[in-house]
Image (tube, rainbow, N blue to C red):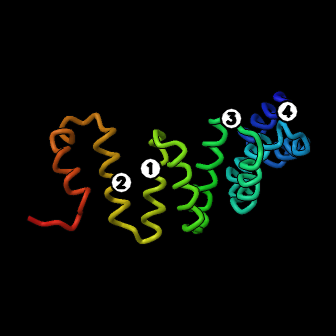
Amino acid sequence: MELIIEKAIELREAGKYEESRILLATLLSDDTYAAKANLQMAWSYDNEGKEKSAITHYKSALLGSLSDIERFDTLFGLASTYRSMGHYKESLQYFEQTLAEYPDKLEIQPFYAMCLYNLGRHKDATALLLELLVSTTSSESIKEYQRAILLYANDLDSTW
């Protein structure tokens, strides 16, 4: 079964999306592998630009047994796909669930900020990105202004 998933991943990475999904479909009735197969199918549809079809498979994957990494990938993929389709409220729900379950996964934050922006929450998006910048930068010149950046990030409209 693992060999089928590995072969399907190779096919997807080679741009053979339909062949990959046909192979993965053989695992959908197997309770042990159905969730993993659905995740791989979702990625295949996403890679092919068929996001609407990916959504169904992400949701199906969440109903099954996934490793911690696979669950993260599924939630993050679903949130990102909803955002790319313009379904910002659904996207927000899944980004917030992903952040709640995986608070240390910084890669979520830029995409979450884009979703906040799409929802008109520009201040929240900017503040989040500023805090991310300060917490992850290796730039000494930005670190010098860390205190000021964080002060402004808390209330971008404040003046003194």
Labels 1 & 3 near each other (Cβ < 8 A) = no
Of 19 and 96, the residue lying toward us = 96
Name the residue rendered at 44%, 51% in the picture.
Answer: 110
Q: How many marks?
A: 4
In the image, residue 71 sits, relative to residue 56, either above or below, namely above
* Quadrant in the rendering for residue 69: top right
Q: Who comes first in sequence, dot 4 or dot 3?
A: 4
Name the residue rendered at 47%, 43% in the picture.
Answer: 103
Q: Who comes first in sequence, dot 1 or dot 3?
A: 3
Within 10 Å of disc 3 (Cα), the crowding (few <14, some 14-19, many 20+) is few
Q: Amino acid at mark 2?
A: Leu
Give the mark toward the camera: 4 or 2.
Answer: 2
Q: Amino acid at mark 3?
A: Ser
Q: Amino acid at mark 4?
A: Ile
User: What residue is pinned by disc 2?
Assistant: 128
Quarter of the image where the N terminus is located: top right
Labels 1 & 2 near each other (Cβ < 8 A) = yes
Q: CA distance from mark 4 to mark 3?
A: 18 Å
Of 152 and 19, the residue lying toward us = 152
User: What residue is pinned by disc 1?
Assistant: 109
